[in-house]
Image: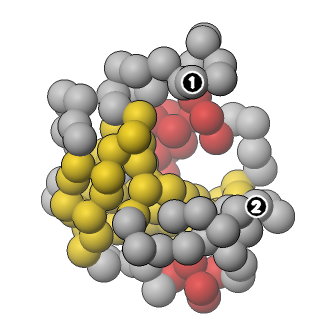
Amino acid sequence: MNESESKVWLRKKVKVLIDRALGTVHPKYEDMIYPVNYGFVPNTISEIDHEEIDAYVLGPTEPLAEFEGEVIAVIEREGDEIKLLVSDGRDFSDDEIRRLTDFQEKFFKSVIIR
């Protein structure tokens, strides 16, 4: 995926179905605890893994089952899929995004698209 394809998501309103709520443990890696709500945008397909596009939900501080918000940025993993950053209306700096997603993104080389 190239940067222009990632940018089509910016400022779009999306619904995220949360399958890994804030505070839950990753199903395969017991030492990975989700510090944010994490899920997917239904009825989308990632070009890389052919599953729904994943999304980090930034802002809410309680575990959620679903969330509607605005895409404020996209994490584009090198040679891999994208992850949407969906917010409750607040803006987050690149440093804040890196800090909040590092639990998972530290394993990948990526860029933040705005």
Question: Picture coordinates of residue 3 (x, y %)?
Answer: 64, 80
Q: Nearer the viewer, residue 93 or 3?
A: 3
**In the rendered image, is residue 85 in sight?**
yes
Q: Say which residue label 1 marks.
A: 27
Q: For the point 23% across and 49% down, which residue is it?
A: 66
Helix, strand or loop for disc 1: loop
Q: Nearer the viewer, residue 86 or 39?
A: 39
Question: Picture coordinates of residue 85 (x, y %)?
Answer: 41, 57
Using the image, determine if residue 3 lies above or below residue 111.
Answer: below
Q: For the point 60% across and 88% down, which residue is it?
A: 4
Q: Say which residue label 2 marks.
A: 80
Question: Picture coordinates of residue 108 (x, y %)?
Answer: 75, 45
- Alpha-carbon neighbours of circle 2 within 10 Å: few (<14), some, or many (≥20)? some
Q: Is residue 50 left or right of residue 36?
A: right
What amino acid does circle 1 point to? Pro
Q: CA distance from mark 1 to mark 2?
A: 21 Å
Question: In the current view of this chain or complex, which residue is farthest to the top?
Answer: 31
Using the image, determine if residue 11 lies above or below residue 92.
Answer: below
Question: Picture coordinates of residue 28 (x, y %)?
Answer: 65, 23
Quick one: label 1 or label 2, which is nearer the N terminus?
Answer: 1
Helix, strand or loop for disc 2: loop
What amino acid does circle 2 point to? Asp
- Alpha-carbon neighbours of circle 1 within 10 Å: few (<14), some, or many (≥20)? few
Q: Is residue 80 left or right of residue 12?
A: right
Q: Nearer the viewer, residue 37 or 94?
A: 37
